[in-house]
Image: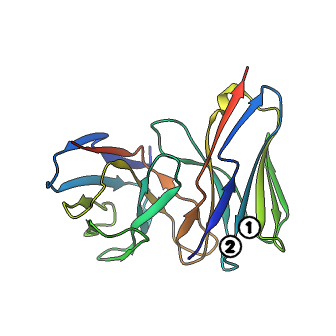
Amino acid sequence: QQQVKQSPQSLIVQKGGISIINCAYENTAFDYFPWYQQFPGKGPALLIAIRPDVSEKKEGRFTISFNKSAKQFSLHIMDSQPGDSATYFCAASSNAGKSTFGDGTTLTVKP
Amino acid sequence: DGGITQSPKYLFRKEGQNVTLSCEQNLNHDAMYWYRQDPGQGLRLIYYSQIVNDFQKGDIAEGYSVSREKKESFPLTVTSAQKNPTAFYLCASMRQGRYTGELFFGEGSRLTVL
């Protein structure tokens, strides 16, 4: 069964700190690795995504690091803000159009 | 504005009743998906459709049914056969083609079985 394992389950960071969430996958057929951000009572929204042909992608305060050989990828949130408090999901999808999600990380950024 | 519209936002159902959740998109996306979200768990795929009049079971299809008669619409019926239907249901769409993969989600429908 295709799996994406995400850690930690919850994370508390002080304002201005760095938040790091990790994911590992098993299926080498995956070719798209997005991160979604979800606020309570809302649907997830794409935050940032990466293809396996690059090792890092940065958009503003958000960076994805990708290690193809280890089948791992991580989200780094620099200068974390209280407004970043949300649940973050990593996912992996193949060209077949199906996405597999991690179990989510609840991030709390304390002022 | 383009997007995914789900309705109703909240729904209460008695045991033994079927209920249908609506999902409409105006993004002109070919693929549509239904996910179930439970506390502490990731999103689990119920059904998906990559083209009109065709759909496939996801990982947890038992107790659910769907139809795809129009490109814009992908309703989900939660039947009385679903043993634990209380959950947050999310509809999503995706543009087909190579190197796509971004899912666009609706706001969700929260179903509670009384």
Picture coordinates of residue B83, whole percent (x, y): 27, 59
Quadrant, the C terminus of chain B: top left
Quadrant, the N terminus of chain B: top left
Picture coordinates of residue A27, whole percent (x, y): 66, 77
Amino acid beneath label 2:
Asp
Q: In which quarter of the image is residue A65?
A: bottom right
User: Callout 2: few (<14), some (14-19), or many (20+) C-alpha neighbours within 10 Å?
Assistant: some
**What chain does badge 1 belong to?**
A
Q: Would residue A99 appear left or right of B107 to someone viewing this image?
A: right
**What chain does badge 2 belong to?**
A
Decide: marks 1, 2 in contact (CB < 8 A)? Answer: yes
Q: Nearer the viewer, residue A23 or B66?
A: A23
Task: Please name the residue shown 84% across and 74% down the image.
Answer: A69
Q: What element carries label 2?
A: loop
- Which badge, 1 or 2, comes first in the chain's sequence? 2
Q: Which of B70 and B62 is in front in this view?
A: B62
Q: What numbered label is drawn on residue B35?
A: none
Q: Would residue A111 appear left or right of A36 to someone viewing this image?
A: right
User: Callout 1: few (<14), some (14-19), or many (20+) C-alpha neighbours within 10 Å?
Assistant: some
Q: Residue furthest front?
A: B83
Task: Please name the residue shown 31% across and 55% down the image.
Answer: B84
Q: What element carries label 1?
A: loop
Q: Quadrant of residue A111?
A: top right
Task: Please name the residue shown 81% across and 50% down the image.
Answer: A58
Amino acid beneath label 1:
Arg
Q: Which colour scheme is used?
A: rainbow
Relative to A23, does residue B53 appear above or below in the rendering?
Answer: below
Q: Would residue A97 appear left or right of A20 to someone viewing this image?
A: left
Q: What numbered label is drawn on residue A51?
A: 1
Marks 1 and 2 on same chain:
yes
Q: Mark 2 points at which residue?
A: A31
